[in-house]
Amino acid sequence: MSGSLSLSRNRNYRILWGSQVLSEVGFNASLIALPLLVLAVTGSAAASGLVLAADALAQLIAGLPAGALVDRWDRRKVMLGCEAIQSLALASLVGALWWDVASVSHMVAVAIVMGVCRALFEPAEDACLPTVVPDEQLATAVALNTGRSAVGQMAGTAAGGFLFAIGRWVPFALDVLTHAVAFVALLFLRVPPRTVAARPIRHLGREIGAGLRWVWSRREVRVTALCAVALNLFFNAFYLVVIVLAQSRGVPAGEIGVMAAMLGVGGILGALLAPFLIKRLSPYLSIIGVFWALAALTPLAAALDSGYLLGLLFAGMALLAPTANTTILTHQLLLTPDELRGRLSGVMSVVAGTAAALGPALGGVLAGLVSPTQAVLACAAGLTFVAVLVTVNPTLRRYPREITQREEVSAP
């Protein structure tokens, strides 16, 4: 899409952004309320973990097929269907709580629906984005979407805990409302016709294979995928280790909550800075900057015993990530043909999600084997090693600033 209309005046982008900031607030309210609900109903921490795991596993398992389906179906209809299905699933849970008949199996089913819908919605939105904003504004749109996620996480998490105290069903009712409003808003979204007509899936395995081959055949996409794995693995391990460290040093629970929230503050500030930094930093510096910032800041946690100072550390660590993410995703979306964009997003979501799931497990193992301080230093060593590898990688050193010529590749 071409044109110079600013994003603030781009009706379609405003609809997409506004509808999803609402959805993310509702989703995060439910996400924090679900384990609280399971604990209140069953008193079992294991059951609480089962429900959250069902959501995460459903998104991971559905990720690759979802990307293929998005590339064959009408993407606007996929987004509308996901909003409607989530609203109905959550409404069933609200009704069960109202009549006091909620069960763990019902909660697991709702969590699975939420995970599958997110697996479908995210690649559909990513694939639509380059068609509703001009190429020259895509980086800004990606950065604003990153900020939207951070706002939704902060506001939704705070609202979910507060509303759950009012009534067990209330945060889920909020989620029903936000998805319903998002559904209505998306009815007014206008997506330009696709160059490749939507058609039924005939060979889903082959469709998925084509997406995997595309990612693997493009060196810069493959390398940045591996970067995402390493970064998510070590940072999520570090996140858990820092919580253990804070608890071992007697940091009050309230300060730990502020510490976690500051990660979102850093993400919001970073998203606002990203369009400015992208214009002034090369893609190579944008990417390696994140790794070296994390490698330098991580060991500082070993010397801090205040939740507020650890929160400032988290905010600093999150500051540069949106710039690198925006650089990478913008390049990938412009490089990838429209008929493969859903599969690209699906593959990258699975890659990042797998690493994010394994990270806390690694952090738990480290915290169990050595002291929290030693675990922090182990994470710092891992990040430093990866930062060195990223710095000397020839593909990243030649990472292009922009795509000057679209590659015409047809999906089989």
Image (cartoon, grey):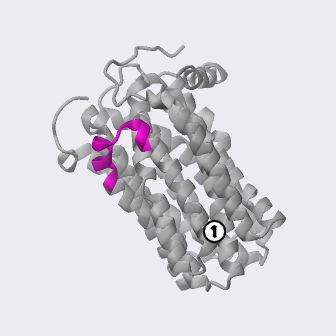
Which quadrant, please, contains the C terminus?
top right
Using a 10 Å C-alpha cutoff, classify the residue at mark 1 as few (fewer than 14 neighbours), some (14 to 19) or many (20 or more). many
Residue sitting at x 56%, y 26%: 215
Is 355 located above or below residue 330 in the figure? below
What secondary structure is the stretch in magenta mostly built from?
helix
- In the picture provided, is 16 more to the left or to the right than 233? left
Which residue is labeled 1 in the image? Answer: 34
- Give the image location of residue 302, x and y in percent: 64, 70
Q: Position of residue 156 (x, y in %)?
A: 47, 68
Q: Is residue 315 above or below residue 113?
A: below
What x and y, as percent, mark residue 398? 44, 27
Looking at this view, is 6 or 392 the one in front?
A: 392
Query: Looking at the rendering, in which quadrant would you find the N terminus?
Result: top left
Q: Which residues are magenta?
A: 273-286
Taking 121 as reference, is 143 left or right?
Answer: left
Percent coordinates x, y for residue 120 in the rendering: 53, 41
The answer to whether residue 309 shows anywhere in this view is yes
Q: Give the residue drawn at x 54%, y 24%.
A: 219
Residue drawn at the location 64% of the way across and 45% of the way down: 385
Q: Amino acid at mark 1?
A: Leu
